[in-house]
Amino acid sequence: MHTYQKPLDLVRERSPERPVAFARPDAVAVAARWFQDKFEGDVFYAVKANPSPWVIETLAKNGVMAFDVASIPEIELVAAHAPGARMAFMHPVKSRKAIAQAYFDFGVKTFALDTHEELQKILEATKGARDLTLMVRLAVVAEGASYSLSGKFGVDLHEAPALLLAARAATEGKMGVSFHVGSQCMRPTAYQAAMAQASRAIVRAGVMVDIVDVGGGFPSIYPGMVPPDMVDYVDSIQRGFADMMVHEETELWCEPGRALVAEASSILTKVELRKGEALYLNDGSYGSLFDAAHVKWPFPVKLYRGEGDAAHEVEGPLKPFRFYGPTCDSLDHMPGPFWLPEDIREGDYVEIGMLGAYGVAMNTRFNGFGDAETAVVHDAPMASMFGLAGRTIRVPRESQEDERKVVRLSRPKGRAGKSRRKR
Ligand SMILES: *Cc1c(COP(=O)(O)O)cnc(C)c1O
């Protein structure tokens, strides 16, 4: 991968014909260190948010050595790019073959389930293994998420006690509960509320759990969607954990996807045509802009114009535009609005920010498009949850470095990889 200080340097060097995805390992490093420093438990990265090898490697280099995986290809990816990492197979529905391969070939011992049938499958596929860590996925009622993740998975709370008892009896290893409050959760208290529901199920079952896994859902910043400070989320989780009916040694886990990687990628696209307020770009809903099209998610944008040394960022008076992607499908439409200089024209480049989570990773080859190259850049993301003041939009490069220094200095020694116990 080529490295540039900032995207404009690439535009100056060669006006790219195809979209370019920018990788910002610095942003992943800052987020990884923030979570380890502030979250009082074990941090598992949810690989599906962005399975790029550079993401896995950067996380591992910055101390995140636990991964939430959902398939054998994800397990192989983590094994290849973070050798020795811990993995938890958190998909509640797995094939027998995938369970056996995970357990026998990759040493994965943690499996999620939300039915008695899946529990039976796990026990049979591991040939009656007694050292499993079994995680019962609960369907919690959570408010404040922009994407619900409870519709498809999770055992209903009134059916949970029987499943908790069955899982407890099935292993001599650990047993825990997990849930997902929904992605891009805008309300910190959703975690505390979910933990109270989990606690009631545990009490009704009359079992002890060894692990409470609060899942993902930690938000990032998008235009018009500025969440509370990330510290409020870990505080809510701490309060929720303190109120739960669990024992002294119960571990706390989380599985952030979006929050660790959203800031870390953007995509550089070219304007192929302007029709009024519609811009036809060379990337779209079958490329990195799945959420922009299907959930009508807004993303921040920047405009670059010109070639060679004359290339520059254009700021000028802004107006709202909508985007069309390059494929012939009419679904390939991103309503935005995307605020760009009003004189934007064919040949200009639009950098679309905050596409590190569920963005650059969603790329397909439909209609012959989607073949984006990746370049590394060291500028700041367009927005950040991890700036010096807890959160600043457009973190300057210097403050990002300061942030890293502060985080490194304030990290107590010897805590990495160990669960913080309940106090
Ligand atoms: C998708 C997913 C995550 C990550 O969710 P984010 O909202 O991206 O943090 C975590 N855990 C499970 C089980 C998931 O399916």
Image (cartoon, helix red, strand yellow):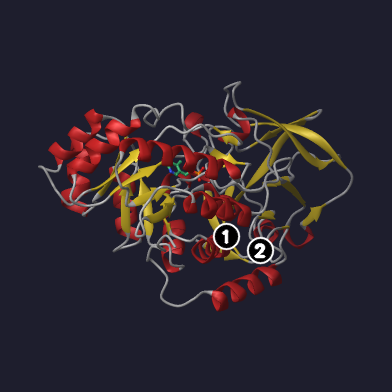
Q: Residue 58: percent from the left, percent from the top?
A: 46, 63
In the figure, is residue 113 to the left or right of 171?
right
Is there CB contact under 8 Å for labels 2 and 1? Answer: yes
- Against 326, residue 374 (above or below) is below
In the figure, is residue 113 to the left or right of 239?
left
Q: Residue furthest top?
A: 330
Decide which of tag 2 and tag 1 comes sooner along the chain. 1
How many numbered markers are drawn?
2
Q: What's the CA distance linking mark 2 and mark 1? A: 8 Å
Closer-to-camera residue (107/373) = 107
Q: What residue appears at the point 71 percent right and 64 percent down from the top-left corner? A: 389
The secondary element bearing badge 1 is classed as loop
| Mark 1, residue position | 24
- Asked if residue 150 shows in the view, the reply is yes
Q: Residue 128: percent from the left, percent from the top?
A: 11, 43
In the figure, is residue 288 to the left or right of 248?
right
Q: Which mark is residue 91?
A: none
In the image, is the residue at mark 1 within 8 Å of ligand 1 by its beta carbon? no
In the image, is the residue at mark 2 within 8 Å of ligand 1 by its beta carbon? no
Of the residues shown, which amino acid type is indicated by label 2?
Asp
- Against 207, residue 160 (above or below) is above
